[in-house]
Structure formats: structure tokens, C-alpha cells
Image (cartoon, rainbow, N blue to C red):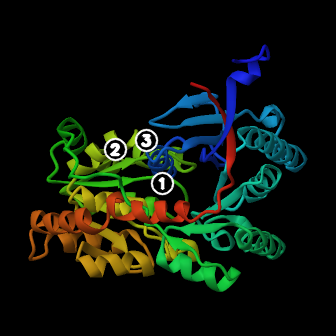
Amino acid sequence: MLGSDPRESYHEVSVPVPKLCIIQYNASRFLTRVDRTARTLADQGWEVVLIGIRDDETAEVEQRDGYIVKRITIKSRALPRGFGFKFIRFVEGILRTLVAAYRENADVYDSRDAYPLLVAHIAATLRGAVVVYDSDELNLDRNWAPSRNTAWRWLMFRYERFFSRRSAAVITSDIGRARVLAERYGVTPVVILNVPDVVEPPARDMEFRRRALRDARYLLIYQGIIVPNRGLEELVDAMRVLDDCRLAIVGYGALRDMVAAKIAGDPVLTQRAELYDAVPFEQLMGYTAAADIGVIPLVGSCLSYRLAAPNKLFEFMVAGLPIVATDLEEMGFYARAERIGTLIPEPVTPSSIAAAVRSLIDGEEPLADIGSRVRAAALERYVWRVERPKLLAVYDALPLRERFVRDRAV
């Protein structure tokens, strides 16, 4: 017989209830690497919550395929710009993120990049959880001004070394970056390539092709963030001499308005280049497959770029596009190993880009044949089906705590 106390209708059992809290210091809109991790673990039975920073274009809560995004609002964003107010926003962001992470009571806190590491480790310590550090960049060698500041580098080195060594696992996206992290911090990163989650070639978006190609013969595409040192100004200028080509730039970022003004201000460029808004991954891959050549004119301005094999490289390959990419260490390796197209020699200039594109178009091997070979290589070796077991192995090896839930008695 059950007693009068309603709590006696439950009994306590010990069962693992794995929960992952991903912490990311941005709005998490078009970041496919994070989405793949979240969906993969959700498919394995994990409860997954992603904590991000709300901006003017995102909702506070967003339900995605198998997981939920919760964005905190930084109220001090309304304050004037300036160092003092920037510091206030910085502190508020840390405090609000920490409160949100603590409330999730997760088994694992996944820090996306170095900056959430502090919050992830504090929340994990308070909750008896562990931290996974996913290092998407080499933080001492990024494409931004602080990397050139001696004091900032001294502080960041000690910060990242301290927390990466205390993380249960470290993940990175490229072999070269893993080598640097191992030498720099004495950790053993697991390399999980930034490859797309597809099982067959994407369908071509023929409406996009008609709109973007117009009366030209070849459609070139660049997709991704539009920021300095991506070679986009040089790429647009290269279109002046590529009279049988048109260029579609799909993405967003700090240089978008400048690139748009550059195109609009020149009658030749207006006819040969066009900007398109960033779109969800499935739609983007339809755009990609509709092009003839993928272009990645990345400038080797920092070590993190020189050792990067960006997601667009593998997305182009899956779509069957011959590729024109800068001859940097990591991209050069894949370009030569899989014979995916032509390389742009450094320095990246309009003439070096145009020459590489022309060499590919005028080469002996037809573009269709290159595309078929590239697609076959990608579907065999550079898709999420291949990388997914590596991620699961990392999480299977984590020392998860046991959590207790109340199960209704039968």
C-alpha cells in the first residue's frame, strides 16, 4: 500500500541522462559545424541546448532539428560605443552566459572557441560536469588586430593553455591546427574535419543559376563570411578580365557593404558580379551545385588561415565543383591529393586569381570530368558519415557523472 505522502509513489533509480550545453559567443545563425555536433548528439539520445548571444535578427529561443537554441540578451548593447562601455558589455555577457549555463545543469559543457572557456569551466565545476573545448581557430594567430598585440597574446596564451589542459577533450578542425595546439599547450586534439552532412550530391538550383549566370558561360561562386583577408576585393577586381564568367558572392559580414559599393560603382563589375544574402545550408548547397567553379581566394594573413581547410572547400567538392583555391598549407594538400582544380599562388592579387581561373577553364581536362572526380572523392572521404564516428568516440570516452531521476512506480 502506498502511504499518504505522494512522494512515496516514486522511487529513485540511477540512470545516465546525458545533457550537453554548447556555449557560443555569437547568434549561431549559419554555423554548420556547431549544428552538426548538436544534431549528431541529439540523434544519439542526448539532450542538447545551445546558449548564444541574441542579435537584432534572431529570436530568444529557437527550436531546431533535435535541439534548442537559447540566446541571452546583452542589455548594455544599447549603451554608446567606447572602451568603458565595451568592458561593461563584456562583463555582462560573461555573467549572463554563466547564469544561463549553470541553469542548464549539463553533464558536458562544450566551449565553441576559446572565449567561452571560462564560463564553461566555472559552470562545469559548480555542476560536477566536464568540458569539451572545440577550437575552431588558432586564437593567438587569428585574422584580427588583437593577435598582433603582445600583451593580449601573453594573456591569451596563458588563459587558453590553463583551460585547454583542464578540459576533458580538445577538438579542432584541421591537422595543421591540431599540430600547433599540441606543441603550444601540451594537449592531444582530436581532428574532426569541417565536412558537410550529406549522403548524395545536392540538386542544382536552376533558377539561381539562370539569375546569377545571365548570358555568361561560366558561373563562379564564393560562399561564406565577407571579411578582410578573404581575397574578396581581389576576386571582384579579377572579374574585369574574366569576360566569359560571372561571380556570385553568397554570405554576410563586415565588408559586405564595401564589396557591394565596389560592384555598383563600376559598370563592368556590375555586369559580372553580384551579392546574395546568406541562406540556410540546404538552400546554399543548391546554389553551390548550380555553379561551375568554386573560388576560395583566402589570404594567408595569419597562421590560422594558412592551416585552414574551410567548410566551403568540402562543400564545393560534394557539389562536384572544380575549385580555385589559394596555395596555403592545408588547402594545398587537399588540392594536390584529390586534384580538385588549380591553386592561386601567393600573394593573392586580381591577376593571380584571374590566371588560376583561366588555367582551369582552358586546361586540357574538362570541368565536368574534374567535378565528377572531386564529387566521388568527397562522398567517399569528406562527408559527415566519415567524421561522425570520431565525434561520438570523443563523447563516449567522457567521464560523465551519474544523475538521478525519479521514475513513477508501476
Residue 370 location (% of width, % of height): 15, 69
Q: Secondary structure at mark 1?
A: helix
Q: Nearer the viewer, residue 123 or 358?
A: 123
Q: Earlier in the sequence, mark 2 or mark 1?
A: 1
Q: Is residue 82 above or below residue 350?
A: above
Q: CA distance from mark 1 to mark 3?
A: 16 Å
Q: Nearer the viewer, mark 2 or mark 3?
A: 2
Residue type, mark 1 in image: Arg
**In this orientation, does residue 342 appear?**
yes
Q: Residues within 10 Å of mark 2 (few under 14, many from 20)?
A: some
Q: Are marks 2 and 3 in contact (CB under 8 Å)?
A: yes
Query: Which quarter shows the C terminus?
Result: top right
Residue 114 location (% of width, % of height): 69, 62
Which residue position is annotated with label 3? 278
For the point 70% across and 58% down, the residue is 130
Which residue position is annotated with label 2? 284
Q: Secondary structure at mark 2?
A: helix
Which residue position is annotated with label 1? 33
